[in-house]
Amino acid sequence: MSKEMKTIGVLTSGGDAPGMNAAIRAVVREALGKGVKVKGIKRGYAGLLQEEIIDMEARDVSDTIQRGGTILQTARCKEFTTYEGQQLGAEVCRKHGIDGVIVVGGDGSFRGAQKLAALGINTVALPGTIDLDIACTEYTIGFDTAVNTAMEAIDKVRDTSTSHERCSIIEVMGRGAGFIALWTGIANGAEDILLPERYDYDEQKLVNHIIENRKRGKQHHIIINAEGIGYSQSMAKRIEAATGIETRATILGHMQRGGSPTCKDRVYASIMGAYAVDLLCEGKTNRVVAYRHGDFVDFDIDEALSMEKSIPEYQFEVCRNLSI
Ligand code: ADP
Ligand code: F6P
């Protein structure tokens, strides 16, 4: 039997991502518009267990759509991965009259939402991560801003790399996934991209490529290295020694997670936030909102977590073919 939604809780969990505030704002205002109360749960599942819960009104999300980060803060919470932690989380929801929870985060956070759903708290998850590593969706909140931020930074490194006729290794985030590296590889016209899903660790091949490109008249050589491969500094030292070409490594790091969200992240996050409220109000639970084939859709979290995602072969080929 579907549960009447009187109060919805919203939390952000795992790594923050630009656009999370747009999602929170949409949740708050869509819910209030339907006569449903909203409670903000601070610091992800950690805040839920600590009962860091605040009432949220329409004005509490004013002036937030353009802000990076998350106004609710975020955290990683080990205790919530235990059954006892999850039971406590469900109890806290009941104590505060929270009938349904919207969780914005990556697939780790989805697992938390799945556990809460199993304990009788209706849940809907939104894909919030700069990594784009969630299989059921072609879009994740924050990816667009992150790749634009990284792209602009890489353009700047490229200027100095050209002036000094250097090789530059630029490390981008993505945890175990190479989507940020792939997109910036295409957008920045990188000579090489190293993706965890594809890299064969044959450094001699890289060295040969750098030397060939120099002979062809290329004034710089940009290598985008994904965080999942890492070791950019030591790689730079080895490449400089093997090629005789000055090589520098730049690790872009957390700058990729910050900044004002792009139009796409604001719009998609807003739609997903509203969609999540609608699902809860229809009595749905254990769902994840996704973007597929040009539309916003939803999946059962169990099904979503069983899906797999790989680097699109054609996009990888294009990136390599255009770097001649
Ligand atoms: P992300 O959501 O970005 O993938 P994490 O994997 O760090 O980030 O997960 C965020 C949080 O979600 C964790 O700190 C934990 O509180 C919760 N979580 C992760 N995995 C589980 C799990 N298997 N069961 C319950 N909660 C989990
Ligand atoms: O999941 C987002 C992300 O930024 C990954 O790209 C990266 O591996 C990780 O989070 C970094 O986490 P932390 O902020 O804990 O250093």
Image (cartoon, rainbow, N blue to C red):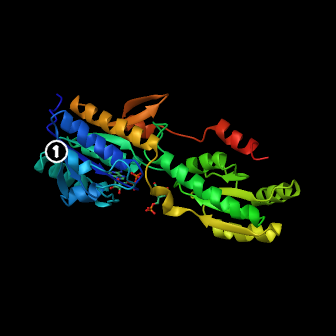
- The one nearer the camera, 209 or 286, is 209
Q: Residue drawn at (12%, 45%), measured in percent from left and top?
A: 97
Q: Residue 68: which quarter of the image?
A: bottom left
| Residue named by callout 1 | 98
- The one nearer the camera, 309 or 306, is 309
For this view, does 83 lie left or right of residue 210? left
Q: Residue drawn at (21%, 58%), measured in percent from left and top?
A: 49
Residue lying furthest front in this view? 63
Image height of 66 relative to 136, above or below = below
Q: Residue 162: which quarter of the image?
A: bottom right
Percent coordinates x, y for residue 174 in the rendering: 53, 53
Percent coordinates x, y for residue 9 in the rendering: 22, 46
For this view, does 147 lie left or right of residue 267? right
Q: Which secondary structure, mark 1?
A: loop
Number of numbered discs overlaid on the protein picture: 1
**Which residue type does callout 1 highlight?**
Ile
Percent coordinates x, y for residue 190 in the rendering: 70, 51
Residue 189 appears in view: yes
Question: In the rendered image, which quarter contains the N terminus?
Answer: top left
Image height of 187 relative to 238, above or below = above
Q: Residue 315: which quarter of the image?
A: top right
Mark 1 close to ligand 1, CB under 8 Å: no
